[in-house]
Image (spheres, rainbow, N blue to C red):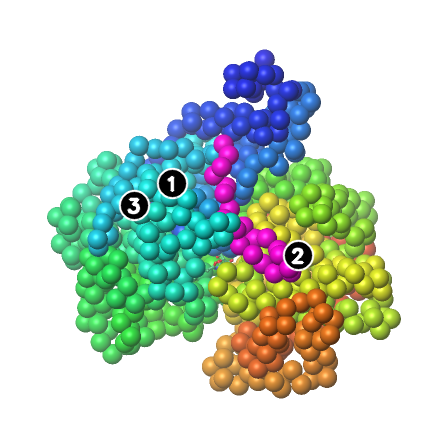
Amino acid sequence: MHRIEELALATFDRPLKDLSDQEVYKVLLDFVQDQTQAQPLNQSKRKLYYISAEFLIGKLLTSNLLNLGCYDEVQAVLEANGQSLHDVEKAEKEPSLGNGGLGRLAACFLDSIASLEINGDGVGLNYHFGLFRQVFKDNQQASRPDAWLDQPTWLKPSTISYPVPFKDFTLKSTLYEIDVPGYQQASKNRLRLFDLDSVDEAIIEGESIHFDKEAIKKNLTLFLYPDDSDQAGELLRIYQQYFMVSNAAQLIIDESLAKGSNLKDLDEYAVVQINDTHPAFIIPEFIRLLTQNHDLSFEEALEAVTKTVAFTNHTILAEALEKWPMAYIEAVIPEIAAIIRQLDQVIQAKFPDQAAVQVIDADDRAHMAHIAIHFSKSVNGVAALHTDILKDSELHDFYLIYPDKFNNKTNGITFRRWLMAANPGLCDLFDDKLSNNWRLDHDFTGLLDYQDDLDTLEQIKQIKESNKEALKEFLYDNQGVTLHENAIIDVQIKRFHEYKRQQMLALYIIHKYLDIKAGNLPTSPITIIFGGKAAPAYIIAQDIIHLILNLSELIAKDPDVSPYLQVIMVENYNVTACEKLVTAADISEQISLASKEASGTGNMKFMLNGALTVCTLDGANVEIANLVGEDNIFIFGKSSQEIVDLYASGDYDAQAYYQRPAIQPLVDFIVGPEMMAIGQADRLERLHQDITTKDWFMALIDLEDFIQCKEEAYLAYQDSRSWYQKTLVNIAKAGYFSSDRTIQQYEEDIWHTRD
Ligand code: 26V
């Protein structure tokens, strides 16, 4: 009897063949956990700690089975018992521990760190209800708690617990752990998530995401990024961040002491990568612990910490660069406030004439990024263009002080999930055509030999079509939507933000709708799919979702247009939906305002799975374009330098663009009779007003160019042979974006855990 069959009997007292999908899921979870439990932890003198507010790990069953090398075996045992692994995979709830690219990057990195046998754990928080679950009501986004923990879980409680001292009380943590097995590795790492025993899920009001923001002992780990549009919300964020890093710092110090550190030499035992500024309080927290509990002087502690911490910047957007009022920090963690004032003194003494690099600004706010840059050993951006912008403009003053700290680490994605698990059909093609060990070296360039081979191009087309079938099933099961047959699938999936310009694609849809109404019918039907959440307090982003849902309804109900155009907005877009969408897409929309998207990682997933990119030269799109060449990508829009200059001069005039004859009818359609008949006037009018008067992220500046570029892309799709040749080149060149390459670079340039 196979171990899985034994486990089924032992757990449910019934044979495997008689279990429900949910029960088989529980059996497989136990089966995997027995195996990872037995794996030894990676070992090295210096250990990496990757600290992040988010780990958007996705479902774990498939990727764990793949990494443990038993996917095929398990599939066979299930099949022999009349069970389907595909159905069992659906029974797993996706953990809701992340928001967007930064969180998904952390998850890809954990997989690559383990797969390269690097000794490194992820450290974060265990949010009971995660971000929020998105539902659509009246063509608007509503937010619900996402109860991802209410089923058998990968989390295992540990005996580790720490006291975390706040101003008026001390909270005790419990550490939970998820094993992270590497691909074909004997040893493992862990994702370590701190939680609070006193959290009380009952304080959530009804089905909403509202709760008493001041009840810290009950709310601290309820949600990721609770609403911070008021003071209580901002204070709660500080409580959360400090709880995360105080636990992390105590864990790191304990593990380093156990390996023989005297803590002055902390950097020989630990390297701490902080994922954006959310964990930046770990710098003063280390100083507090080392000086109060371990007898280091302030200067010794500062030196040890600066040699241990490395900082990754993920955005240049001003509103995402955290600046906390010192009064708030004093109200929550006064000892940390005092240390930040000491750090401020250090910088004032060193750079008295440089206001731009101070720790505390003239409004008495602590700049978390400035703390992270001064008191770390490395500062990296996440794509070549992004790092250049940091050096040349956003962080130029810091770059002049610390030129050697700055470095680039272009993001990547784990090919175990985004190729091997998500696209088995493409893997079969690789096995057929490539003679190298592509699963490990990620070199697919051998495919280029088949550019003119019609059979290969046909096979790529077949793979795409079967992935479209899988997407069709997914969309129907999830939200009862029927994907059109034979449509070109055009996808924009990412958080909703004005800089990502979903509103520009919505204006394109209006253009296409009017064009079809005028009798210009597309040769192939077009399906445009959006997916993504908007922060509950981000009103304009909610308005854009409302516009898209209205357009979807208008078009679906119009028999003149619906045979040619379909607009779908995926509800509660998450990692699972992403896996289905990137493998089925023909076109990948990467249309951010140049300079604003630090890297993007969805762009890499689409490229790897054979979608062609319609893009501005922003973030990692630049690197994609350089790899595939201009014949194999669709580029439009103003350059990053033009946009940076335009912000500097303040010369952008939304009204002037709005008044152009090709643009005005599209924008006015937002408040025209068709939309007003189905939508909410206040939302549509606010969005119209915003675009015509402010348009801070310049959707209108690139709109005409975008429309032309999309028409070219759709035309190119009509030439099937040439389209799949371009697809082939994209797939063949995607190896560069393996997160194994990224992690190898972090290891060689920053972490040095193997030295
Ligand atoms: C900032 C804030 C500010 C307040 C509300 C909640 C919140 C949540 C996250 C952030 C940081 C956003 C930074 C971020 O996600 N950056 C993305 O990082 C990806 C991985 O490097 C990169 O591919 C994306 O281009 C970049 O936008």
Please state if 457 lies on the left or on the right of 404 as rendered. Answer: right
Give the answer, above or below, for where 472 lies relative to 679: above
The residue to which callout 1 is attached is: 192
The residue at label 2 has a CB less than 8 Å from ligand 1 = no
Give me the residue at 73% from left, 74% from top.
673
Give me the residue at 47% from left, 81% from top.
648
The reply to whether callout 3 and callout 1 are in contact (CB within 8 Å) is no
The reply to whether callout 1 and callout 2 are in contact (CB within 8 Å) is no
Please state if 415 lies on the left or on the right of 33 as rendered. Answer: right
Asked if residue 151 shows in the view, the reply is: yes
Which element is circle 2 on? strand
The residue to which callout 3 is attached is: 247
Q: Which mark is on residue 569?
A: 2
Give the amino acid at mark 3: Asn
Which class describes the residues within 10 Å of circle 2: few (<14), some (14-19), or many (20+)? many
Q: Quick check: is 150 in the magenta stretch?
A: yes
Quarter of the picture holding the N terminus: top right
All told, the count of numbered labels is 3
Stretch of the chain drawn in magenta: 133-152
Instruction: Give the mark nearer the N terminus: 3 vs 1.
Output: 1
Give the answer, above or below, for where 82 lies relative to 740: above
